[in-house]
Image (cartoon, rainbow, N blue to C red):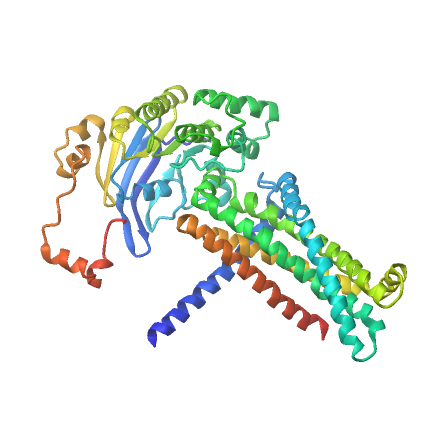
Amino acid sequence: MSSPNPNSIEVRNLVSYYGSRQILHNVSLDVAKGEIMVIMGGSGSGKTTLLNHLLGLLKPASGSVRVLGHDIAKLSPVALQRLRTRTGVAFQSGALFSSMSIGDNIALPLREHTRLDETTIGIMTRLKLEVVSLAGFEHLKPAELSGGMIKRAALARAIVMDPELLFCDEPSAGLDPVVASSIDDLILRLRDAMGMSIVVVTHDLDSTFKIADRICVLDKGHVLALDSVEAIRASTDPRIQNLLNRRTEDADPDADSYLRRLVGDPAHTSAGTSRP
Amino acid sequence: MTGLLDRIGRRAMAGLSEFGFGATLLGECLYWLGMGAKRRQPVRLAPIVAQAMEIGIGALPIVTVLSATIGVMLAIQGIYTLRLFGAESRVSLGVAMSVVREFGPLITGILVAGRSGSALAARLGTMRINQEVDALTVMGISPVRFLVVPPLLAMAVMLPALTLWSDLVGLFAAGLYIAPQLGSSMGAYIDEMSDLVRLNDVWHGLGKSAIFSVMITVVGVVNGASVTGGAEGVGRMTTRSVVHAISAIVITDMIFVFMVTR
């Protein structure tokens, strides 16, 4: 099944549009096997769009996305479905099925993709719940869990098929520092114990520096930097430094264009390059 | 003027693309029904049964009440109208035809569209904005197979079944008014009915309700899947799905009758 290609993800010159607005400009990045890659960027940097491309939820306007050795735009539906059983995704909001209990949520991929009997599925479900420290919560509905527990349950569901590649969208957003840090530890443990390649999309600096092997900094749809943690920290690029030091961007010095935007001059209102 | 034309054109395109989406969806449902097992994504019985309980059994009380009401109403109107010709005794024929061919399927379709079509749209819309549909997709589970086929099948079975029930209740309730008014007995009324109601008329009604069932599901799913803009969007699309489904039912009914009856 696995290809000889050592990279889990290869993105080449990816271009993406939302309507007529260009969101991603020639994005290229690789994620090596067993690596934790953090995709970082402010709001509107295009990181969510990039993630949706990696998940195959969006079709690239040009460029290619290879996941586990397969160009996902060219895969047949059957092959894509098979590929998706080898990857796991933890969504930002958890995206747990609200009509099912936590246990059923986590067991769903097993029930749909394997022919294991219910006893085995139950054991594997509880095993993953142990991993994310949620043992004993399998009978609760998602609405009965706290934000941090939902994120951990979503992680458990993402790893229940023992994927080779795991995607986490904002795993620590909106959580208190202690819970956020426990999720970071969990991600590190998953990589160390199971050898997963992990792609984390986040704007949380603390967790980025804690878990990342390499960091990809996105800014307005461009890859601003793609390097190790130390190199990113040492970077002299003012925009990276702004992001790292939580400084605001320099204000627009052009008074005329500011005025034109305020009065709603059509030449300026429709031509924004970043997402609102 | 160009602005108006532009708007009309855009609306027409949007409507047309929704039709296309609905047709594609229906095709995809049939595909999963036929091919699901081969692709190791079988359509499972348990969710279909659960949906059938919700759509069918859950609607029984209200269908019963409204069908009985309509039956009595038709009986009153029928006797009043036919009295003008001195032909009250023929009221059973009118009631039999109208309930079985028209009112049974129509009232059941409208009720189920309001109860279950809207619920389907709201559920899918909420799942969409919570990224649950995306979650299914990236798990390698087809959302159409998992979320759309079960209600489609459940609806296709339960709506005709409910319609049949509605026919029986409507005719029986009409008899409760007609028999004393015409000075005959309930037994005689039932005997008369079993002669008057032809299988052909029953099939006419059930055939329509089968078409309605597909339309209610597809309209609900199309609207649910098109939700954008959070909770307000879910509410808007839910309302829209009810209005569209009921309009579709009434219009289709007319077209069906036009094609079949003349």
Q: Is residue B202 above or below residue A50?
A: below
Taking depth in this image into account, of B187 and B105 the one nearest to the observer is: B187
Given residues A121 and B48, the one toward you in this image is B48
Which quarter shows the N terminus of chain B? bottom left
Residue B65 sits in quarter: bottom right
The spot of residue A55 in percent (x, y) is: 40, 40
What residue is drawn where x is 78% and y is 61%?
B171
Residue B59 place in picture, x, y as percent: 66, 50
Residue B143 lies left or right of residue B50; in this view the side is left
What residue lies at 70% left-to-right and 65% top-to-bottom?
B102
Q: Report the number of discs.
A: 0
Closer to us: B84 or B1 = B84
Taking A97 as reference, is A246 left or right?
left
Relative side of A155 to B104, left or right: left
Quadrant of residue A217 within the rendered picture: top left
* For residue B203, side relative to residue A136 (left or right): right
**Nearest to the observer: residue B175 or residue A217:** B175
Residue B27 at least partly seen: no
The residue located at (13%, 38%) in the rendering is A238
Image quadrant assignment for residue A118: top right
